[in-house]
Amino acid sequence: MQPTFILALDQGTTSSRSILFDKTGSIVGLAQKEFKQHYPQPGWVEHDAHEIWETQLGTLVEVLAKGKIQPQQIAAVGITNQRETTVIWDRATGEPIAPAIVWQDRRTAELCDTIRSQGKAPLLQEKTGLILDAYFSATKIKWLLDHTPGAREKANKGELAFGTMDCWLIWKLSNGNVHATDVTNASRTLLYNIHQLEWDKELLELFDIPASLLPAVVASSGVLGNCEVIPGHSIPIAGVAGDQQAALFGQLCVDPGMVKNTYGTGCFMLMNTGEKAIHSTNNLLTTIAWQLDGKTEYALEGSVFIGGAVVQWLRDQLKVIHSAPDIEKLASSVPDSQGVYIVPAFAGLGAPYWNAYARGTIFGLTRGSNQAHIARAALESIAYQSADLLRAMQADASIPILELRVDGGATVNDLLMQFQSDLLDCHVVRPIVTETTALGAAYLAGLAVGYWQNKEELRSLWKSDQVFKPTIDIAKRNSLVQGWQRAVKASIVWANDHT
């Protein structure tokens, strides 16, 4: 039986998914399972690594069963994942030593302040391309080693393994035979030198992390081991990339200057800068885009911590809507937000502000403000935050942006996409296949095993579904942005008074 599909495992922040793609890059099967979010203390966010594995394996089995697909029809497995989320497990038993600390978690913000006060932030940015923040894995690893009984002793003896979610899945899929991560995920730890392409000894010492914890680092496209969880079958694991880099590749932003924005739980904008790592002077991240065919390519990245999650908040906490899609109808029932601005800094502010102490705020409320105005302001906050990122990118790269390629769940919202185009004064392009995160992982895996021949073949598969064009004048745009910037400034003033 000829291998006819690529299987992408998409391990996200709120759900695990398995998606089957065919030669045209079309989806032929999809299974999804949500898993529980744990909030043990304010600012803390945890996941159960076992539950993540069980949901991921469950969707793998389900997608094959639903499509009546035989394992031998799978040419390769590609993995993409929520980045930075940190799990440490016992090498002998495979048991996690504690719950996984999620990328949104803020418990190590004070540790970051301490390290910053030691003057180490410039060194970290120079070596890793990252801003010193609780977002990344290094401080999470240190926290787990410092706060889990016996963990340091075990780590010093080489008995523990660290991984981001890609690494955890590779370990589980390979039955514990492979402890590896790819360059994109390694570049999000604050421990990996993105210029030397190796774990950095000086940074390991700074965070007091034993090198024995760390996985091997491999290319984003290439066979690194085998999936052994289906009895009697061994399928190559051939592509790995963190979710945002995978989405950049899935959008075929393979030339310098091309930009994509993913609208998920958070929003993540990446610009391909080619084989040059551009140092940001606007509080963006310099990160590895992928390693392919012996070449390492880089990207500028801006992260919005709360994107689509603001809609979940309206649904789950405020009970303003019954389901996420309801927001478009409610927000469209008013012509504008009537001067209401929401700064959804529930987990601090990301780029370009990087304020760990900011919290969610609503400004401009009047007696006439209603649910629809708040719903519209919530939607618009996603676009405002994304516009902040693009402006910072244009300043760093000195490249005018003609179009923004978009993907992720919120892109089905035409109101949001049109507002995004109006704010940016550029075309916003939504592709036919919006599952570009999983598609990127599939492409990377498929290239490694010859399922697709090269990037040129992949380019021919990308097709747009709709192009949103700006419809407002410059005065209106400036007025909207000015109101947003006032709201952010007020939110930061409140945050800076936290002591």
Image (tube, helix red, strand yellow):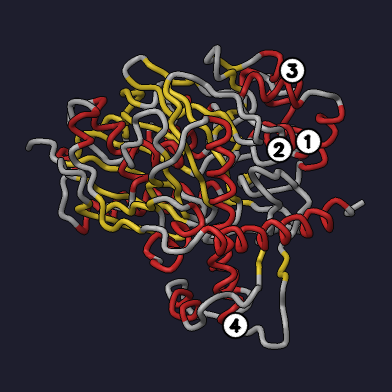
Residue type, mark 4 in image? Gln
> Of tags 3 and 4, which is closer to the observer?
4
Residue depicted at 52% across the width and 61% down the height? 308
Q: Disc 3 versus disc 4: distance between alpha carbons?
A: 51 Å
Q: Is residue 35 visible?
A: no
From the top left corner, tell me how far across and down residue 484 is, in percent: 66, 60
- Name the residue nearer the viewer: 57 or 463: 463
**Residue at the outermost bottom position:** 368
Nearer-N-terminus badge (2/4):
2
User: Label 3, on which residue?
Assistant: 205
Nearer-N-terminus badge (3/2):
2
Q: Quadrant of residue 155?
A: top right
Q: Disc 3 versus disc 1: distance between alpha carbons?
A: 15 Å
Classify mark 4: helix, strand or loop. helix
Q: Is residue 181 above or below residue 350?
A: above
Is there a contact, CB below 8 Å, between mark 1 and mark 4?
Answer: no
User: Label 2, on which residue?
Assistant: 133
From the top left corner, tell me how far across and down residue 471 is, in percent: 42, 63
From the top left corner, tell me how far across and down residue 160 is, in percent: 61, 28
